[in-house]
Image (tube, rainbow, N blue to C red):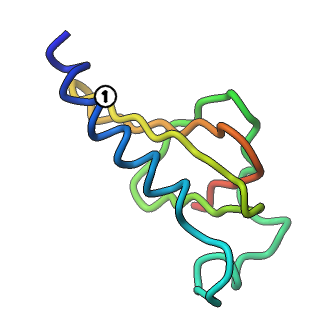
Amino acid sequence: MILRKAAAPFTLLLFLAFSGCGGGGGGNDTASVAQGSGTTMTAGRSYALKEGDRIVKRSPDAQVLLETDLNTGETTATLISGSAAIEE
């Protein structure tokens, strides 16, 4: 229970960070990524992330929830809305 309380602010912070990213500005993250590369995420499905993976927004309204298990250190990403992919 304590771990869930500790993880909640961290998860919320990551969710807000990813929901506010992207859209305009000419950043490098999405401009150089080809549409066909990476693993396309499906809404509602959780994906285990590995070190070096990055999430690329494929639509301006993409929202991804990131959760880290404090016991195992495993991080999962779940597409909430929009379109996104995981690049290795």
Q: Position of residue 47 (x, y in %)?
A: 58, 36
Tell me which residue sits at (55%, 54%) in the image: 19
Q: Amino acid at mark 1?
A: Asp
Instruction: Give the number of marks.
Output: 1
Which residue is denoted by mark 1 in the rendering? 69
Seen from the viewer's position, the closer of residues 22 and 33 is 22
Q: Residue 78 appears at what percent x and percent y?
A: 59, 36
Helix, strand or loop at label 1? It is loop
Q: Residue at left 72%, top 42%?
A: 81
Q: Is residue 8 above or below residue 53?
A: above
**x, y percentage for residue 65?**
52, 39
Q: Around disc 1, counting alpha carbons within 10 Å, would you say few (fewer than 14), some (14 to 19), or many (20 or more)? A: few
Q: Quadrant of residue 22?
A: bottom right
Which image quarter is the C terminus in? bottom right
Q: Is residue 85 above or below residue 10?
A: below
The N terminus, quarter of image: top left
Pinpoint residue 77: horizontal percent, then vertical percent.
53, 40
Tell me the residue at 34%/35% (across/down): 68
